[in-house]
Image (cartoon, coloured by chain):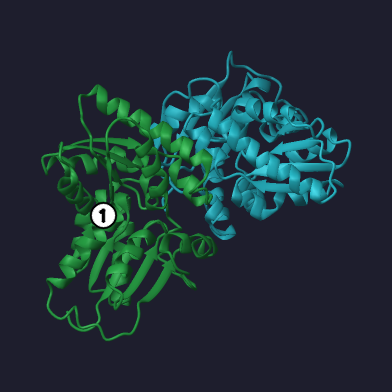
Chain colours: A cyan, B green
Amino acid sequence: MSGVPTIGVFDSGFGGLTVLRALTERLPQARFVFVGDTARLPYGSKSRRTVARYSAESAQFLVRAQGAQFLVIACNTASALALDAIEDAVPVPVLGVIEPGASAARAASQTGDVLVVATEATVQSHAYAAACSARGLRALEKACPLLVPLVEEGWTEHAVTEEVVRIYLDELRAEAAARGMVADTLVLGCTHYPLLRPVIERVLASGDAGAVRVIDSAESTAEAAVGLLHAQPGTRAGAIAETEIRCFATDSVEKFERLGSRFLGRPVGKVELLDLGG
Amino acid sequence: MSGVPTIGVFDSGFGGLTVLRALTERLPQARFVFVGDTARLPYGSKSRRTVARYSAESAQFLVRAQGAQFLVIACNTASALALDAIEDAVPVPVLGVIEPGASAARAASQTGDVLVVATEATVQSHAYAAACSARGLRALEKACPLLVPLVEEGWTEHAVTEEVVRIYLDELRAEAAARGMVADTLVLGCTHYPLLRPVIERVLASGDAGAVRVIDSAESTAEAAVGLLHAQPGTRAGAIAETEIRCFATDSVEKFERLGSRFLGRPVGKVELLDLGG
């Protein structure tokens, strides 16, 4: 790899734009190509075989048609179910979101007890629990199915959202306490959740159960990607003045353009429609 | 048609079980076959062409493989975008949910001004507004994207849900008032919403904007189906002792079984996995 790196970022929807945002903050002189497979979401209800096939198709588009030299799988379901299949499908390094999140939790936790909030599909895969366990952590996962719709409704600072977050976190902490866990770390295991970080931190601070540090797996993944890229020769030789971002979606381009900017932290611009079939 | 009728009911998910429930209450001596195309939901973000193809495949399965003599399309998106395509695909009568809902609103409204709550996809199709307009009604539609996730979370009697319903209905009534409308009727334009009818009626009753009657399009559709069936010779000669229900889903059978009973008002029993491809 040499010159300006082209980094492919893939998600089943547009939540993965939070990972792209974290990447652009750390790699302002790179090219990014993002694919949101919005026509076929949600991946969470689909079988491993189907998720692997869909993810491989997007990965191949990013590498073959867009010249990506490095792939970030900014989708928890695809990271949990299809990382091996994606690695088999393309000849470039592939990084998912789960391992970096678990590594950041390992670095942050003093007690070794970790809480994870995620979508139902991610929780059912137990991918975070497995990745945490491999690092000597005990993890308790909780599905929070209302949080994605609340973010997509734009209620990121709404009293209703704060109440829902409080209910979910109270339940999670009560269950952790019942298991004798002393959790000091909370992993945001969904690419939508970084938009709720302020309200989540406020709810955590208002409790009386001790300080809990929040790990944003989008941030952790971007840090891991930078580390891997810098370990490869030539990738620091940025030759463009500013970040280049190109976004593709397989459906719902209008919704992607409308909501995507909140996740990316800047206008997503024109989103191109991509036909992957199926 | 003669003897015990077999009625096919189709939805992109399992929300249409509220329509099936309303049908079984009125036709206890019939056979019902339900298909939820859970592998390919949500239909709301897909193009008209894709929705038409998917819907036609399910309709053909119901008629050809399951012997349905009458189809109820218990899905607002498919009713809005694909009713013609389904009628072309199968040789049996087909009834959608939108026209019966609009007819019930016409019968109920004194002022001629009607409110409609539905998913974003249904609102964007403006199918209810068009069907109401064809009956001389003025309709104002509002997307309520949090209500389906709240129902699926099981929070049908939760304080958070009541607050969300209040926010949505306050916004809707304020906009109606700003347009000079005197709305006396609210159409539930989503098959999930009948589970929220108690909280919706409570919120409406607590307001000071005059009485509003709630129209449940699942109920209206079942009533229209009974009328159409009884107009056909032989269909009243029920020869079975009790309702027979067979449910198919194209994915997520476990979730269908777990949540479906709330919608159907009785156990859904074993849900069979159906492969419609793609």
- The residue nearer to you, when weighing B118 against A253, is B118
Considering only vertical position in the picture, is B236 above or below A28? below
Q: Is residue A226 left or right of residue B206?
A: right
Q: Chain of mark 1?
A: B
Identify the residue at image location x=49%, y=45%: B150
Residue A39 falls in which quadrant of the image?
top left
Residue B90 falls in which quadrant of the image?
bottom left
Q: Is residue B129 visible?
A: yes
Residue B159 is situated, as x and y percent measured from the top left of the image, at: 52, 40
Q: Is residue A5 visible?
A: no
- Looking at numbered disc 1 in the image, what kind of residue is underneath it? Val
Residue B129 is situated, as x and y percent measured from the top left of the image, at: 21, 39
The kind of secondary structure element at disc 1 is: loop
Q: Which residue is mark 1?
A: B97
Residue A103 is situated, as x and y percent measured from the top left of the image, at: 79, 39
Residue A222 falls in which quadrant of the image?
top right
